[in-house]
Image: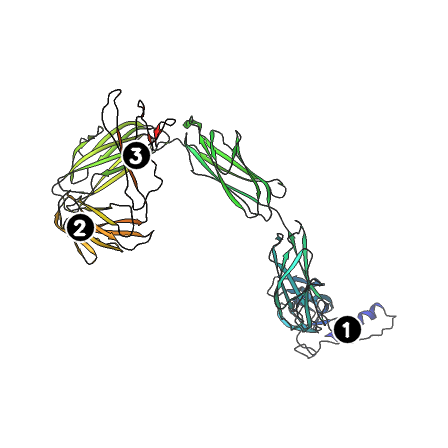
Amino acid sequence: MHKIITLSLLKLLFRLLPAIALTLTISSAAFAMGPPDKCPDTTPNGTPCLLIEKTAAETTVNPGDLIHYTIEPRLFRTNKATDVVITDPIPVATSFVSVTGGGVYDPNSTRPTVTWTFPEFNQGQKPSFELIVQVDNPTAATEVVNTITIVGNDSDHNPIDGDTGSVTVPIGESPFIELTKTANAENFAPGEQIIYTIAYQNTGNLEAVNAVLSDPLPRSTIYVSSTLGGVYDLGTHTVTWPADNLGVGSGGELLLILQVDPNAVNGTVINNTAIMAGANFTDASATSTVTVQSAPILALSKSAGSTVTAPDENIDYLLEFSNQGNAVARSTVLVDTVPQNTTFVSASGGGQFDGTKVVWNLNNLEAGETGSVTMTVRVRGSISPADDITIFNVAILSQEDNTSSPPAESSVSVPVILQAVLEMTKTANADFVDAGANVYYTIHYENVGTASADNIILSDRIPAGTSFVSATGGGNLSPDGTEVIWTDPGLVPGAVGQVQLVLKLDLALVDNSSIINTASIDSDSTIPVAASATITVKKSPSLTIVKTANVEFVQTGDQITYTLEYTNRGNEDATTVTIEDLLPPNTTFVGASGGGVFSNGKVNWAFSRLGIGQTGSVTMTVEVGMVNDGDIIRNDVTLDSVNAPAVSAFNEIIVRQAAVLTLLKTASFSFVAPGQEITFTLLYENTGNAAASNVVIEDYLPNLTTFITASGGGVYDPVNNKVV
């Protein structure tokens, strides 16, 4: 086909230029003589095919170099091809730079790709376009392999043979060191430690030989320590790590710790650079920059002791302050203005009230120092609900130089609420009540709010198993007999009320059954409030015991007499009653009243019964053995019966020596006439277990009397009108 086209051209040329002699030269370039052997069908009249040739201008490259590819597509054995697409994925270890010939670069495909598209491609077309990529730097790859593909259809849109071309460009071998350096923060205070992390890696494709890492210390820093064998040279102020060979892809991480100079000036910038050098690679470096920051940071928090308040109530404010910075806050002052509609009451911590505000001179506030003070104000009483007042209060904490740290401010709002709030409690006169007996309920109610509660209604529903007996305070039984109702025109804030209700328990109530009685109170301006009392219908004894001693303190050899008082407060006799009293350690039994029997370190009393409401008492005497000052002598006793739970009591006495003085004064007459003499007798005694020294008795003369004489060495002091 190619020869036929060439002959037709020759005929045309002869026809146009008949007088010109023609010489024809056939080029020997690729594709000039027809399709090469790479066409699938190599016969002269074989099937059509698309071929692609790709070459690289560079025979070898280094990391970071450019590769210039030339791409030439051709069509054979047909005049025209359609839907021709050339696809060239960007090679691994390279990045796209540019392309000619209308190629479109798509970085977002599965693999970044350049694509050329030709709706029609004629046999005579001989395009040539260029693709430029850059080799990664660093890279561990040893070559760049680029493969290109061409596909298309014939003029009837049937697929024809395509082609693939590939070019390989070797990459020169070279180590490449990547070095990074970071600090654990951006800003540091004087005296703080900076922790640097230095990371290194050979990302080239050749081993790095004799790699040495060094770090010259910057100004305003002091060496502290380093990991992985770093050695600090005081002369050069440099930390150096031992030389090492780094294989391809190998690396490591180490720490360098420096201290910021305690005298470093605020705002000082510290640049610290690490360097890695070696025998066969270019030096790598990394720098970290931090700043010295030295300033106080004032913080203030203000809170109120209550979320709401009322007229004539106090508000307690708590002010908590601190210096959260790293430098002293000088001449610190806390100011709290007394809010409107309040009056100043008090302030802690040396706060001075000047008529409008409270001022605390806190002097210097060290870094990290905290503190708190309080201020109390009282809400004015003349506030009505229509005023709708909220107590707003602002406090400010400032220092001498507010440019280094701005003032801290804190505020709190407390609304003044005028509202009636009713509270109520209900109690019964006993926990256990006999069937058929009366129960006396006491109902106490109060307005704990800040406004009057008007038109109060108190009601108490009669529980099942009971019947109404009486009610105080004007309580009336409802017409249907189900509840007792009281009315009260109103309670001002703080006012209280109390009524009593008496109910009778039915005789048929079952033993151990519970009676729950509930009362409720309401008014025009409050929500209903309820209170209940529960009693148990039960016949049972209820035992109590109290133990006392005749002395408060003792010494070795003293005697103690314990008195045990016991009672049955229940509604049934206690039977087979026993009292068991354990002798305290370091004491011996002396005696017991009421038939007490001592055995095995304890005294026991036994009674056949203890009647309802019956009380009794017994005593036990012991002698104190060898004890030391400060010892505690504890004595425990238990009261029990077969039909009541046991109860216990104890007494403790301190071992020590002390004088106990008593004084009794009597007169010779109960009634006297003017001019009559009165003789006063003073009886004094030391009931303790130690002598009383330097004892003095003073007796002041009563009004309308004159001193006559005193016995026992008493001396009259006319100046102070007393006998000593």
Give the percent coordinates (x, y) of residue 297: 58, 45
Q: Which amino acid type is marked by label 3?
A: Gly
Residue marked by disc 2? 592
Horizontal side of residue 516 vs 250, given as left or right: left
Report helix, strand or loop for mark 1: helix
Task: In the rendered view, tell whether residue 230 sits above or below residue 609.
Answer: below
Task: In the rendered view, tell whether residue 87 sits above or below residue 530.
Answer: below
Query: What is the C-alpha distance between the residues marked 2 and 1?
Result: 149 Å
Question: Of the residues under marks 2 and 1, which one precedes in the sequence?
Answer: 1
Q: Which amino acid type is marked by label 1?
A: Thr
Residue marked by disc 3? 712
Question: Of the residues under marks 3 and 1, which one precedes in the sequence?
Answer: 1
Q: Dot 1: within a 10 Å radius of its alpha carbon, few (fewer than 14), some, or many (20 or more) residues?
A: few
Marks 2 and 1: CB-CB under 8 Å? no
Residue marked by disc 1? 6
- Taking depth in this image into account, of 280 and 397 the one nearest to the observer is 397
Question: Of the residues under marks 3 and 2, which one precedes in the sequence?
Answer: 2
